[in-house]
Each structure stands twice: as C-alpha cells, then as structure tokens.
Amino acid sequence: EGHISPSTGLLYPFVTHHLAKTFGAFVLQPEHRFYGESQPLSSLELSESLALQQQSRKLRYSSQSTLSESTSTNSTKSQQYNEDPRVSLFTSEQALHDMIHLLHHIQIELGCSIDRSSSTTHYCPVVTFGGSYPGFLSALARVMFPETIDMAYAASAPMGFYAQQVGATDYYDHITDVAEKMYPGCKGAVNSTLEEVRLAIVGGDDDD
C-alpha cells in the first residue's frame, strides 16, 4: 500500500525467503499505479487533457447562446469545472490489468507459456499473495483472471469492505469490539486519548 523503492525491497519475507527458494519461483511485486512514481499520465499529458476539456466546453456553451440567463449562469459555472482525467484510471480493476500485463511480459521473458494448455512451451503456475488491500487484489485477480492466476492467497482481506458491500465503519467497529474483548477498557482508553489529542489541537487554552 505504497511505493516500492529499492531500499524497501520485496515484502512478505516468508514468500521470498522460503516459498520461492523451496519451489524455485520467480517473485514479482508490481507497484500499484499512482503509488510512488507509477503515474499513468505524465504532467504534460494531464495538462493537455484538462486544456482540451476546457476548450470543448467553451465551444459547446458558446453554441447555446439562446439559453436563458439563469441557465447561462449555471453553464458558466459548469464550464469552469474540469474533471481530472486520472480519476477514471484510479481503480482496483485498472491496477489488476496493469499486473496481468506486466505478468505476461515477465512470463514471456522467462520462457514460460501464458497458456496452461500449451504443449510446446513450459508453463509456469502463478500464485498471488497479499494482505489487507493487496489481499483483496490477490483474491480478485484469481476471480477476474482465472486463465492466468492458478491460486490466490488473501490474508486479512476485508472483501466486503473494499467491494462496498458493508458500511464504511463496519470494519473499524469490528476491530474495536475485538480489542475491547481482549483488553477490557481498551476502547474507552483509546477514545479518551484521542479526545485529549483533539482538545490539545483545536480546544486548548491560548497560554498552552
């Protein structure tokens, strides 16, 4: 859930230090788009896209000169708004397509067939790993690309949370309940501490 720098190295040591060595596996850790340096659009492409949107809106609204004054006012406000073209590119599905594209490229470089039914090229099984959000991506990769992903391991992956099938605070409410059962008083202690922090920041005396 962040950029992958050379100094950080690969995550999941059990995979890299044990499983990969045992099975002679190649470990690939793609960086999620918009994390770190992984930007689908360059600064120039972004500026050009926003400029084209603005020009298009000007042409469209200038041809509607017969609109009422109130409608024209609303149109002027709409004209000033340009949708960031990166929004539609920042999805889990897009990130998974990035991963599959990169995976196929690496498979070809390693001499592995991307078709498990191929009899002419060696096939290399693919297993995905992840925890939390990466765990969600791991499981979803198996669901979306079963012809490419042979097995998926998803640890602590709140599938319903990221799929927006549960309430926005359900996951955190559950963690709070678990902590309170393990350490009675934990919930109250955390709440009081956060309240003290809040008061120190926004409600403290001028002399403090």
Image (cartoon, rainbow, N blue to C red):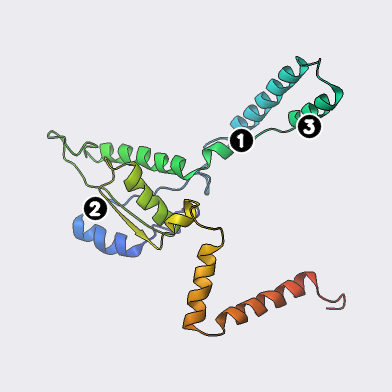
Q: Name the residue under label 1.
A: 43
**Circle 3 residues within 10 Å: few <14, some 14–19, many ≥20:** few
Q: Quadrant of residue 116?
A: top left
Q: Which amino acid does label 3 sit on?
A: Lys
Amino acid at circle 1: Ser
For badge 2, the amino acid type reads Ala
Image mark count: 3
User: Which circle marks residue 203 in the picture?
Assistant: none
For the residues labelled 3 and 2, the Cα–Cα distance comes to 56 Å
State if disc 1 and disc 3 touch (CB < 8 Å): no
Label 2, secondary structure: give it. Answer: loop
* Pointer 1 local density, CA inside 10 Å: few below 14, some 14–19, many at least 20: few
How many angstroms separate mark 1 from mark 2 (CA)? 37 Å
View extreme (bottom): residue:
184
Location of residue 158 by image quarter: bottom left
Task: Measuring from the top left, give residue 33's x and y in whole percent.
Answer: 49, 44
Residue position marked by numbered label 2 in the rendering: 25
Q: Nearer the viewer, mark 3 or mark 2?
A: 3
Rendering coords of residue 60 (x, y %): 71, 18
The answer to whether 46 appears left or right of 28 in the picture is right
Local SS, label 1: helix
The C terminus sits in image quarter: bottom right
Which residue bears the numbered disc 3? Answer: 77
Upstream in the sequence, badge 3 or badge 1? 1
